[in-house]
Amino acid sequence: MRIDKFLWSIRFYKTRTIATDEIKKNRVVIGQSVVKSSKEVKVGDVIKIRKNQIDYKIKVIQIPKSRMGAKLVPLHIKDVTDKEQYEMLKLRKASQDYYRIKGEGRPTKKDRREMDDYVENENDVTSDFTDWDDFFGETGDDPQNED
């Protein structure tokens, strides 16, 4: 099976085109040599893949006939990636700011929704209580103005 089709069929890449593009960018290596999309994969090959700034290593156990479900992938490959690589990935994800800093730039769609919800909720509270005497439960006797 071709390497691009193999990487797609084991669900390493979402589409075969993406797999082919990554191979053209020299991010896929079998053994010690960079490969082309037409390279045939054999049982026992160790494939090194650079993805998301991590060097993955997978060993081919079995060649699939076609694209498979995610639960069947471990039957065809074995992940031999160094644990250090996964630790680096965790550190990188933890250090990233997933949300922009307040005060920078225009509000995002999420920000606008939150602001709209806040304004709607605020308006709902004030519109329900137009008679402030009823709101505070006063009967007309003001204890502060006792003369």
Image (cartoon, rainbow, N blue to C red):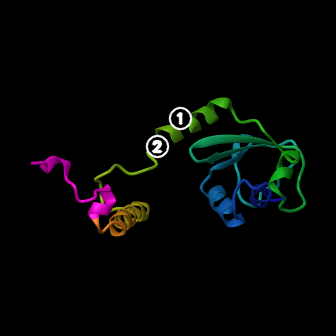
Report helix, strand or loop for mark 2.
loop
Report which residue position mark 2 lands on: 96
**Magenta range:** 132-147
Report which residue position mark 1 lands on: 91
> Which of these two is toward me, 40 or 139?
139
125 horizontally vs 52: left or right: left
Give the residue at x 72% y 53%. Answer: 12
Mark 1 and mark 2 in contact? Answer it, CB < 8 Å: no
The amino acid at mark 1 is Leu
The amino acid at mark 2 is Gln
Point out the image quarter for the N terminus.
bottom right
Residue 4 sits in which quadrant?
bottom right
Considering only order in the chain, which callout, 2 or 1, is on the residue closer to the N terminus? Answer: 1
Give the residue at x 34% y 49%. Answer: 101
Magenta stretch contains residue 133: yes
Give the residue at x 90% y 60%. Answer: 65
Give the residue at x 56% y 44%. Answer: 53
103 horizontally vs 11: left or right: left
